[in-house]
Image: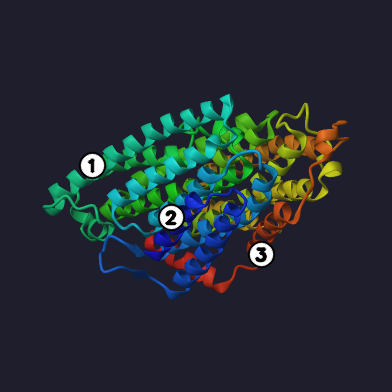
Amino acid sequence: MYLIVVPLIGALAAFLLPSDRPRPWIVAAFAVLHLVLAAAVTAEGETGLASDWFRFDALGRLVLIVVSSLFCICALYCIGYLRLRSNRPNRIFCTALLFFLAMTSLVALAQHLTILWVAMEATTLATAVLLYFNQNQRSLEATWKYLMIGSVGIALALLGTLFLAYGARLGLGEPTLLFSDLVKGAKHLPGAWVRTAFVFLLVGYGTKMGLAPLHTWKPDAYGEAPGVVGALLAGGMTTCAFLALLRVYRITDAAGQGVFARELLVVFGLLSMATAAAFMVGQRDFKRLLAYSSVEHMGILVLGIGLGGAGIFAALLHTVNNALTKGVLFLAAGNIHRAFKSKRLEDVTGALRRLPISAGLFLAGFFAITGSPPFGPFVSELSILTAAMDTRRYIVGALYLILLAVIFIGMGSTVLAVVQGEPPEDTEGRSFRESAFKTVPIIVSLALVVMMGVWIPSWILTLLHAAARLLGGS
């Protein structure tokens, strides 16, 4: 429980501090402390409280260490970023950041579907506050769209939760929503109620993930959010929503409805990739490009689960790779945006000449996220393709490869237009400096992505295997 309490204490400290200057350091200090505690929990194995409602199983520990690592990288970056944005008060921003960390930890810890639902809604509210940091008309519109569409999604997830509780009452004699009870008694749950609940929960938490056609909040939210917020949304918020979906999938599979669930996931996965491909070709806004990249990779995650077997392990591995790579892309894109004061290709060219480090990292992040070796996503995306071939889903595998190729070409044309050429003559843009806090955290994130491509530490492999076994994977 201290993984929730510690960031809440940090949030209170950030809120009570009278000065803006030390708050980013408070966020960074508590982020590092949280990462240390999360690493200790991961090394310790399955742990929990006296109550069955809160426990870190393998899935929870995997998501915890991923989100905590990404948050720590973003918190260190925030020191330089908020110094650059010193004209804006950061009290609410820093408080919301640490509250976000506490609620994502609660998502990982929760072993009760209602607690999970509450934690996901609290995470949504925290990120809505972060989205509005720029306080202009576009960020206000993006925040309201995020809240409205997210509210519909969370309402549908609540309906799915109620359907599952009613199914438990019919099959088990009591409306329990504890994951352990539901998995243990899954064979007795009415199939019709389980399928209905899964559809509503897939649509509900799929909205939070940004699966197509439920992704419509992403382009505006990612396009208008500060880069650090985009990284937390694309690598943190969506990872937590994916965990919620995995919890529900585990119950559905144990109830004998796994084939039904997996077919739905394959459809949503390919649809998300196809939607992303369509909107990435010719995209003129490089931050909206990253939003569609997130839609693509949410599709890849559910596609891997839908393939089953080794695909489940590959999807969990891709969860790690996607979060770290999104940290590289969004933070580097944030630097480029600050330097050029624009996200449009008409105004942003020659980034390699003006910002050699940030633009170089942005280019490397592009190659990583599109599955190029030696980066981590290459391993996980290739593993998903292998799973499709092993299960003789040849049409799915072929569509997967074609969509990856289209996305590589579409994304590449925009990214290369940003980094190549001559920068515009802009005296104000030349004043941007690539300080250590604005670049070193991105370099660390990229180094982790490379590590996951050439050598996966044994403890991560052990954790991934344990999480995959919980879901019936291999």
Image check: 309 left or right of 255? right
In the picture shown, does residue 175 fall above or below 4? Answer: above
For the residue marked with disc 2, what is the amino acid? Ala
Helix, strand or loop at mark 1:
helix
Residue 353 in which image quadrant: top right
Mark number, residue 451: 3
Front tag of 2 and 1: 2
Label 3 environment density (alpha carbons within 10 Å; few <14, some 14–19, many ≥20): some
Label 1 sits on residue: 162
Label 1 environment density (alpha carbons within 10 Å; few <14, some 14–19, many ≥20): some
Contact between marks 2 and 1 (CB within 8 A): the answer is no
For the residue marked with disc 1, what is the amino acid? Leu
Q: Position of residue 207 (x, y in %)?
A: 43, 37
Q: Residue furthest front?
A: 18
Label 2 sits on residue: 102
Residue 70 in which image quadrant: bottom right
Q: Residue at x 84, y 39 (%)?
A: 430
